[in-house]
Amino acid sequence: PRQLAVHKCTTMASLAVSTSDDPASNAYSPRSTAILKGDTDAVPDANGEVPEDTELVSADGYAATEVFGGKSLSCLGYTYDDIILLPGHINFGVDEVDLTTRFTRKIALGLPFVSSPMDTVTEHMMAIMMALHGGLGIIHYNMTVEEQAKEVRKCKKYKNGFITDPFTLTPEHVVADVQRIKETYGFAGIPITEDGKMGSKLVGMVTNRDIDFVEDPETPLKDIMSTNLIKATEPVTLTEANTILRDSKKGKLPVVDADGNLVSLISRTDLMKNRDYPTASKDATGQLLCGCAVGTRPGDRVRLDALVKAGIDVVVIDSSQGDSVYQLDMIRWIKETYPGLQVVGGNVVTQSQALHLIQAGVDGLRVGMGSGSICTTQEVCAVGRPQASAVYNVAKLARRFGVPITADGGTASTGHIVKALSMGASCTMMGSLLAGTEETPGEYFFQDGVRLKRYRGMGSIDAMQQGSEKRYNWTGKAAVKVAQGVSGAVVDKGSLKRYIPYLTQGTRHGLQDMGAISVAEMHDSLYNGKLRIELRSPAAQREGGVHNLYSYEKRLF
């Protein structure tokens, strides 16, 4: 049986060819006979489609079950580069391709893109830009609890519908207090209430225009605040409030109750962002979605408490090997303590690992072990799995429980994104693909005339010394740190404002070429056998890239 399976996966099925000179003499269907005679009017069906005739067309490629199979069929693990997806029939435009998906059971995203919780990839700027475009950012934990919570607040307050907890001050506060808020959070539109709290009577507003030319920072706000305010009165919808804001040409619109007490605030910049980013990932209140990573040690429970208070929507339990009693205990504790919080477990690469986490209560899974560009787990520990095989097998199980999976690692191009999704992933988590963009932490530097930015694995010695050791050692500090990652540098990729649209369009083109108009349809094709796959030889992989040129310039967009 093993030899038969290998033979089946390495040979092409033959077409039945007749030796007769008369096509009509062959035992084909009437439509097939008409096609062979050149009667092209007989080709389309009633819907204008060109249906396949099994008498003329053999089944190209192989179903995923044949490629990956079970233990009796294959003993090989495959990476993204080992496989190639065969094209399907296109009957829709590329702009019609729907990339909406789910990161967890309850969190839907407009794009299947999630930034990795690495200290050289995701802090508040990355999380904000990912959410604005319809994806999601997961803020790393290589920082103090207070610093991570602060990163969350910056993201959650960046774009809001009704801002229900704006910063408020009293008339007795001074200009220096406003400047401090502006330096920390990037805005200076502050409502002034009688006691400096929400629900108190609104008496004024202070904006940049009020403080720009004030020389004495100790000037009381009551001397400079605007008191002739345009306000909205509850009940008011977001659409009505936005209309008032647009017509008044003000930067901020306070919303008060019948007694004049402040209940919320709307920002003009938020209205503009709603226009520029219509598919942004937002929660029920209009704030951007934001996730954070935590470990499995006791101190991470204290950390999570602060993050929940800061407003996170999802927590990712960060571990190189997720199937441990430490992570299972953490998942159960989170579900008991914060039943409304979405939890993503991982990392896993086998169905057995995934089942344990699903039984513990996870809402999503993170799949990948040793496949990242800066990860050396497979080299150092001899444990892991090729990414395409890991994604397919875990997704196959998780689908039965309605748990979405995120392919984490091994993604170096839009082609890899398409392959990850086609293997059953609902999202792809990106580290190296986003590293080097303006929104990542760190400063640019030049080396040999090339503009670069630092990028390192969370398993590198540098990152472990900052706190990520608990990702690899769950019980305490190790006497000897064993690196499972490296530190390096990547070339400047510019801003995500241009880069994410490139990734989005490249992914759409991939689905279109496969004949899938949505991620959901592609997953259906994967499991019903319509999606066809072939393995690539080393020569085929070389052929699929740039070759036979003396020199060339590769521009992504």
Image (tube, rainbow, N blue to C red):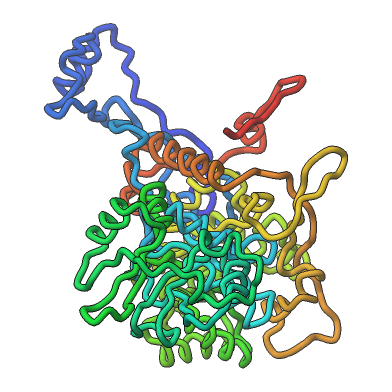
Q: Quadrant of residue 196?
A: bottom left
- Indicate left or right for 208 with 396 as reference: right
- Indicate left or right for 124 with 378 as reference: left
Provide residue 354's location: percent of width, then percent of height: 48, 74
Front position in the image: 473 or 446: 446
In the picture, which quadrant includes the C terminus?
Answer: top right
Provide residue 210's location: percent of width, then percent of height: 51, 63
Which residue is depicted at the point 43% across and 55% down?
A: 269
Vertical order, 152 against 75 (above or below): below
Vertical order, 24 against 235 (above or below): above
Front position in the image: 23 or 477: 477
- Name the outermost residue toward the right: 448
Q: Is residue 272 visible?
A: yes
- Name the outermost residue toward the front: 223
Q: Quadrant of residue 389?
A: bottom right
- Name the outermost residue toward the left: 46
Front position in the image: 55 or 542: 542
Q: Is residue 345 visible?
A: no
- Indicate left or right for 460 with 78 as reference: right
Vertical order, 449 against 341 (above or below): above
Q: Quadrant of residue 116?
A: bottom right
Provide residue 229's location: percent of width, then percent of height: 34, 66
Which residue is depicted at the point 48% across and 49% down?
A: 67
Which residue is depicted at the point 70% across and 55% down?
A: 373
Front position in the image: 205 or 448: 205
Provide residue 296's location: percent of width, then percent of height: 60, 85
How many marks can you see? 0
